[in-house]
Amino acid sequence: MPVIFEGYRSGALAGVLGLHMDYYGRQWGLGRKFETKFALDLAEFLYRFDTGRDLFLTAWRDEKLLGSISIDVSGGGLEGARLRWFGVAEGARGTGLGKQLMARAISHADTVTAGPVWLTTFEGLDAARALYERFGFQFQAYRDEDQGQGDIRELVFERPAPSLPVSGTVGL
């Protein structure tokens, strides 16, 4: 069965939350505080979702959520659009799905914002970091705030605004 990419569908919020908790709960020991903050942030994003600017993308096979990614343009802040809630289910890792999700998200950001995109991630997520860097994200800083509530060091990455194409050349 092919992977179906779509936006929000009934139950997607719970699915994305479960997808992330399957990983972060098991691998990183994150629990109630991380899960409730994650749920609140995602719910707030979906509640104020601007269909002309923001992106909420999910990937499904046979009603099973395989991955998600979002671009928060309307709430990204002064730093630009924010890439958030990127995750791929355990059985779908290594299949290229993460790369497909990232490519669609970056294409959306470049089309809608033409500005920088930033994200936060955890130190130690080496595969995710490598993917971010392949898509032009550059490490900016360590973040003092521990949003995960798990004593985990957060990193901030930014992808600069895409270069504008040169329109025409002047001949001599």
Image (cartoon, rainbow, N blue to C red):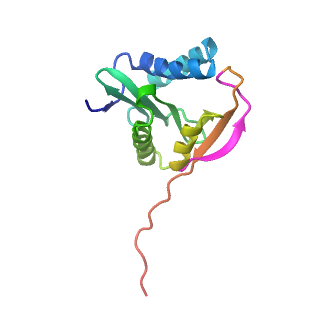
Report if residue 2 lies within the magenta region: no
Image quarter of residue 124? top right
Location of the C terminus (image quadrant): bottom left
Magenta-drawn segment:
136-148
Q: Is residue 50 visible?
A: no
Report if residue 138 lies within the magenta region: yes
Image quarter of residue 31? top right
Name of the residue lying farthest toward the top? 32
Name of the residue lying farthest toward the bottom? 172
User: Where 171 sits versus 38, above or below?
Assistant: below
Location of the N terminus (image quadrant): top left
Identify the residue at image location x=31%, y=26%.
61
Image quarter of residue 77? top right
Task: Tell whether 145 sits left or right of 159.
Answer: right
Give residue 16's position: percent from left, percent from top: 45, 22
Q: Is residue 138 visible?
A: yes
Give residue 116's position: percent from left, percent from top: 55, 47
Give residue 109's position: percent from left, percent from top: 45, 43
Task: Tell whether 112 sits left or right of 122.
Answer: left
Task: Tell whether 100 sits left or right of 87.
Answer: left
Identify the residue at image location x=44%, y=63%.
165
Which residue is more in the foreground, 63 or 119? 63
User: Where 97 sits versus 171, above or below?
Assistant: above
Identify the residue at image location x=43%, y=42%.
99
Name of the residue lying farthest toward the right? 144
> Total number of numbered labels?
0
Give residue 44's position: percent from left, percent from top: 51, 21
